[in-house]
Structure formats: C-alpha cells, structure tokens
Amino acid sequence: MTTKELENITAQALDLVKEVAGFIKEQLGQVAAADIADKGVNSLVSYVDRESEKRLVAGLKKISPQAVFLTEEETVDTVVGDLKWIIDPLDGTTNFLHQVPVFAISVGLEYRGTMVAGVVGELMREEYFYAWQGGGAHLNGQRIAVSAADKLFDSCICIGLPPAEGVLYQQTLHLLAEFLPVTRGVRNLGAAAVEAVYVACGRFDAFMEQGLSPWDIAAGAIIVEEAGGKVTDIRGGQDQVYGRSFVASNGRLHQALLDAAGTLPG
Ligand code: IPD
Ligand code: CA
Ligand code: CA
C-alpha cells in the first residue's frame, strides 16, 4: 500500500472514530448496574463496548471491504487476511463505568503482520491521535514527537496495572518499587491506548505493561513509532502487538525499562 493510500484510509478511520465517540459520550453515566458484566478479574464490559464495536466494524467495512477484523468484543468473526483492523471499541471501560474521564477508541490497521496505521481517540479531551506508515504521528492536525528525556531521574513514566492475580501482580509491584524512587513520578491512567499515545506526544517518557491484548496497543504502537519512539516486547523483541507485553519509550530510556524488566521475579 502506498503512503498516500494509507493517509486516505487513516483520514476516513479518524472520521469514523469521531462519529462513534459521540455514541460513547452520550452513554456516559447512563449504564445501569444490571447492564455491566464481569469478564474476569478487573475486567468489566457493557452494551456500550459492543455497540461501539459494531458501529466501528460497519464503518471500516465500507472504508476497506477487503479487510478482516480482530476485535475485543468478538462481534465479528476473526479470520485470516492480509489487511486486518485491530479494534478496541472502548479502552478504559472501568474508567468509563466509573465516570473517570479517561477512555478511548483504538483502531489499528495491520498489513501482512506489520502495523501500518492507527487512530486513538481520547474521547473526553477530544484528542485524536493518528499515524500512518511513513506519514508521521499527529494529534488533532499537529505533528507530535516523543520527549527528549534521557535520564530516568528527569522522566515521568507510566506502569500498567494488569489484573491483580498471579505472577503479574508481583511483577507489577516490583516495577513500581524499581521506578518510583528513581523517576519524577510513576503514573497509571487505566487505558493502555491512551498511555501509549501519551508517550507519542511526549507527556510520558515511557510506558510498560504486561498482560495486554493486541487491541489495547496495536494503534498506539504505530503512533509511537511514527512519533520517533521505540516499541518492543519486554525482552526487547518485536512481539509487542501479540506477545502480551509492551514497552514504549522515547528511545533514549528504552534500555532502562528493559533492564528493569530483566530483574522481574517469577
Ligand atoms: C484495559 C485497559 C487497562 C489495562 C488492561 C486493559 P479495557 O482495557 O487498557 O489500562 O491495564 O489490561 O484490559 O478492558 O478497558 O478495554
Ligand atoms: Ca483495552
Ligand atoms: Ca475494551
């Protein structure tokens, strides 16, 4: 696919994400307790997630009829294909249901195993982050870039908080103990897609989380890369989308995060 074709697809996906954002925002504060289901430890879902996904899938089918889908709520069959949309219809569901105003739509486009475009809309701030391969990363029409920090001591980093069970729980506590004393601060926003794009625009200098699924960070990964940052799995390899571990940074701090990951218990 050419850069121009990807730019065009990204622009159409961006319009669609803005449209579906309107639906999600209308539902804020409207979801009854009876409409909330528990998918697992620390994992909620409601009709809002599913309806958002259906609208995204319907719109993306019009944009690229040949594409297949990988979606969190499984409202569409997952099949093999060269061109694949990877969708999180509502990232930060727990925030949304608690009316904590940090949640997003995340839509990434993969071509033959490589992320080639992505849109992350942070809905309440109306901040739309997007990128396409070779086209740079953008926030509401402006080019964005990762930070220049090269010392942990000057950095604000984000550590993901995966479900509080098993070895991941111990490892998360370990990472907090590693980074809290040696950085300006450690943050968590409860929405991995937002946390990734905050690295892309330099608000966070780095972000790492384990236990994520492809839809959490598919779009964020290419947005960080196109913003000049680096993304890997926690071993420094390139399995960051499917490998259930994600490290994003401004590049300069990447090794410091991988070093900490190398000391994880378990
Ligand atoms: C979750 C959020 C959260 C992360 C979880 C994800 P969801 O996504 O991104 O920050 O810690 O691992 O599952 O369920 O709100 O789409
Ligand atoms: Ca998610
Ligand atoms: Ca979700």
Image (tube, rainbow, N blue to C red):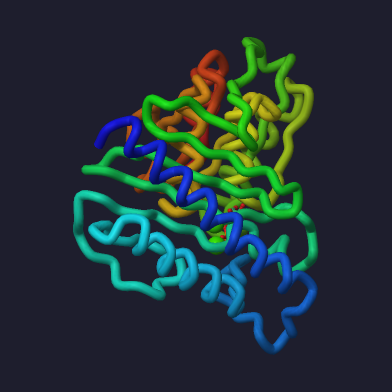
Q: Is residue 181 visible?
A: yes
- What residue sits 61% from the left and 30% below the top? 199
On the rendered structure, is 263 left or right of 239? right
Instruction: Name the residue located 47 percent from the left edge and 64 percent from the top edge.
Output: 56
Quarter of the displayed picture in which ligand 3 can be seen: bottom right
Q: Residue furthest bottom?
A: 34
Residue 122, position as x, y percentages in the image = 66, 49
> Is 154 placed above or below 68 here?
above
**Where residue 23 sits: x, y (%)?**
65, 69
- Along the line of sight, the residue nearer the viewer: 198 or 155: 198
Residue under the image location 52 percent in, 57 percent down:
16
**In the rendered image, the vertical position of residue 134 relative to residue 36, given as above or below:** above
Q: Is residue 204 above or below residue 81?
A: above
In the image, 206 versus 120, the foreground residue is 120
Viewed as shown, does residue 93 lie left or right of 250?
Answer: right
Residue 258 shows up from this direction: no
Q: Residue at x 63, y 41 (%)?
A: 195
Q: Work out which quarter of the rendered image holds the N terminus and state it.
A: top left
Q: Position of residue 220 (x, y in %)?
A: 50, 40
Q: Residue 2 sits in which quadrant?
A: top left
In depth, the one of 216 and 40 nearer the eye is 216
Q: Position of residue 32 (x, y in %)?
A: 74, 84
